[in-house]
Amino acid sequence: MIWGTYPQEGATDYQRELSRYLQKLWAGFIKDPSGQGPGWEKVDADGNNIACIGCTGEVAELNLIASATVDGWCPTYELFFGRVKTPFVKA
């Protein structure tokens, strides 16, 4: 979504709007990395929270959510993906 290279067919208006917003944020950061930015609250440096942009349905809204909300599922998927062999990689 950041680069606008996702499949546009079937995308919702919200997804298109969110993609444009993320592109605008990245362009602003590239232009001035020390600039004011969008004015969001800082994300915890200790890693207990992660930023979720647009996760409530508001494109420009950033919410801090507990990293365990997302990362808590990792052990479940690691069990599965640890057994998957990628046939496309040549040894």
Image (tube, rainbow, N blue to C red):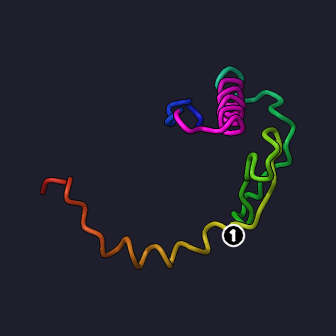
Q: Quadrant of residue 59?
A: top right
For disc 1, the neighbor class at 10 Å (few under 14, some 14 to 19, many from 20) is few
Residue situated furthest front in the rendering: 10
In the rendered structure, the answer to whether residue 72 lies left or right of residue 34 reads left
Part of the protein shown in magenta: 9-28
Residue 78 at x, y percent in the picture: 43, 74
Whether 50 is drawn above or below 84: the answer is above
In the rendered structure, the answer to whether residue 57 lies left or right of residue 78 reads right
What residue is at 60 percent from the left and 69 percent from the top? 71
Query: Label 1, on which residue?
Result: 69
Q: Front-most of 39 and 60?
A: 60
Whether 62 is drawn above or below 48: the answer is above
Residue 41 at x, y percent in the picture: 86, 48
In the rendered structure, the answer to whether residue 34 lies left or right of residue 40 reads left
Residue 52 at x, y percent in the picture: 73, 52
Q: Quadrant of residue 27?
A: top right
What residue is at 75 percent from the left and 52 percent from the top? 55
